[in-house]
Image (cartoon, rainbow, N blue to C red):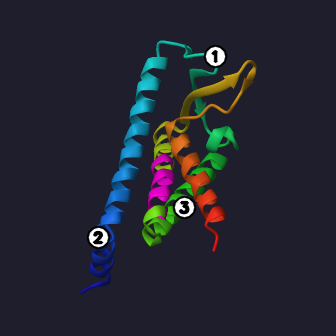
Amino acid sequence: MNIFGTYSRNFLSLFKKKENLIGIILILIIFLLDRFSKIKIINYFSNNNEVFINDYINLNLVWNTGIGFGLLSSDSNLFYTSISLLIFTIIIFLFYIFFKSNLVDKFLFSLVLGGAIGNFWDRVFFFAVPDFIDIHYENFHWFTFNIADIFISVGIITIILKDLILKK
């Protein structure tokens, strides 16, 4: 058998493990939930400016060219492309870790990967990530974020806390 047959068979065997398949399904669900929310928001805000929900939360569409929470935003195409390639590399690395992880870590990495792929999709197709959840108290506004950012943040924070608490 040639080298490509061996690699493709090994790659496909990764999806035969039940916990890998469940993790991939979770990644897909998170990605689709993120896509659905962004499509709804983009369509809604094509005719509206801002949605007041209560004294602490508004919906307001902001296009983010940076990384999480608008950090490293730039108008430079070279910088944007470099950051996008770095994000793509990190996603590939996270998949490697995902496939090597135990069940609990697979779940946590699925949260991060689902959100990261959702935001990366926007970077590729819109050249910016639509953020729309605006949490604030009076005049203090937290960074505007989206559903993908929630999953990424919860996943990363939980991974860190799990490793700190369950440190051997």
Q: Which mark is residue 89?
A: 3
Question: Looking at the rendering, in which quadrant would you find the N terminus?
Answer: bottom left
Q: Nearer the viewer, residue 26 or 31?
A: 26
Is 36 magenta? The answer is no
Look at the magenta stretch and give its main secondary structure.
helix
Q: Is residue 124 left or right of residue 54?
A: left
Quadrant in the rendering for residue 159: bottom right
Mark earlier in primary sequence (2, 3): 2
Q: Amino acid at mark 2?
A: Leu
Q: Residue at x 35, y 64 (%)?
A: 19
Work out whether 7 lies above or below 55: below
Query: Element under label 3?
Result: helix
| Image quadrant containing the C terminus | bottom right
Residue 55, disc: 1
Q: Say whether residue 168 is visible.
A: yes
**Separation of disc 1 and disc 3 at Cα?**
40 Å
Estimate the x, y position of residue 74 in percent, counting from the top left: 69, 40
Residue numbers of the magenta segment: 105-115
Q: Position of residue 65 (x, y in %)?
A: 61, 38
